[in-house]
């Protein structure tokens, strides 16, 4: 079945450091890929998405590129801020309208001033 | 536009008791999802409704969990009787077929603690 694997955490960085969070997936067909973020005390929010190979999703300075050859969707940000401290989830959605989301375990990012 | 509403936000019960969670999706969203998020794990789909019909309940423990969406709007998820391993955050999400990417919008969740 479909699955998503995220790098082990937690991750602690200093403000303005470069961020990479690794995500790889296993799925049949051509899934859509997502990064969701969960800020402390809040619900899950969509951060960015990509729906086909080589697409780059971007939002709030974060980027991720859909790499079908390596089945990866790594999240990057050039300069993190304290306000980026949150839990980040990689997810995929199988082909088909309103298919369910399959999530990775999530990784906690803490950014210190 | 109002988001997905859930209640209660927190619930503490003893094992073998019953509990119910309520979800009100975004207006006009035909698809509603219930996810279970155990601490340290990603959300896992329990059940998906399309209007008031069940699309996928393959991971719902049907011996103790039940869910309904009678009028195709609000939904209730029930656990009876609860076990210790049911301690988790229960997330409700909704989506619209009319949206370009069928984005799922999540509610704040209900944190259940079973003692």
Image (cartoon, helix red, strand yellow):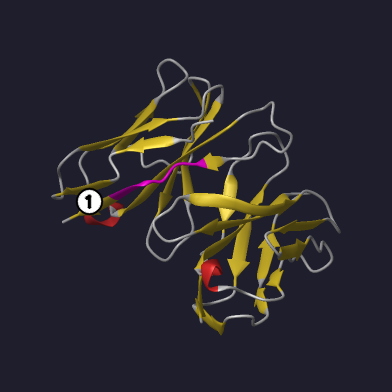
Residue at point 64% right, 40% down? B103
Q: Which x, y percent locates residue A75?
A: 68, 68
Q: Quadrant of the N terminus of chain B?
A: top right
Q: Is A77 located above or below residue B12 in the figure? A: below
Residue at point 13% right, 50% down? B14
Residue range of the region highlighted in magenta in the rendering: B106-111
Any part of residue B54 in sight: yes
Q: Is B97 located above or below residue A30 in the figure? A: above
Q: Which x, y percent locates residue B34?
A: 44, 39
Judge left or right: residue A105 versus residue B84. Answer: right
Q: Quadrant of residue A78?
A: bottom right
Q: Which residue is mark 1?
A: B83
Name the subunit of mark 1: B
Judge left or right: residue A98 versus residue B41. Answer: right
Q: Would you say residue B110 sits in the magenta stretch?
A: yes
Q: Quadrant of residue A18?
A: bottom right
Q: Nearer the viewer, residue A19 or B77?
A: A19
Extreme-front residue of the structure: A113
Q: Which x, y percent locates residue B80?
A: 22, 38
């Amino acid at each position: 079945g479909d699955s998503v694997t995220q790098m082990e955490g937690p991750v602690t960085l200093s403000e303005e450091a470069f961020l990479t969070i690794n995500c790889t997936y296993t799925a049949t067909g051509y899934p859509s890929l997502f990064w969701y973020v969960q800020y402390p005390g809040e619900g899950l929010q969509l951060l960015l998405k990509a729906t086909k190979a080589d697409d780059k999703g971007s939002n709030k300075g974060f980027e991720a590129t859909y790499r079908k050859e390596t089945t990866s969707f790594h999240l990057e940000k050039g300069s993190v801020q304290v306000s980026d401290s949150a839990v980040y989830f990689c997810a995929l959605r199988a082909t088909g309208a309103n298919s369910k989301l399959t999530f990775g375990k999530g990784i906690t990012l803490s950014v210190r001033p | 536009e109002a988001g997905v509403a859930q209640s209660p936000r927190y619930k503490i019960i003893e094992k073998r008791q019953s509990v119910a969670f309520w979800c009100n999706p975004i207006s006009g969203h035909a698809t509603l999802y219930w996810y279970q998020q155990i601490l340290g794990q990603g959300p896992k789909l329990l059940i998906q409704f399309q209007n008031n019909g069940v699309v996928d309940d393959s991971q719902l423990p049907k011996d103790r969990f039940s869910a309904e969406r009678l009028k195709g709007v609000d939904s209730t998820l029930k656990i009876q009787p609860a076990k210790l391993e049911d301690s988790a955050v229960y997330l409700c999400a909704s989506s619209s077929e009319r949206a370009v990417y069928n984005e799922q919008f999540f509610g704040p969740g209900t944190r259940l603690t079973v003692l």
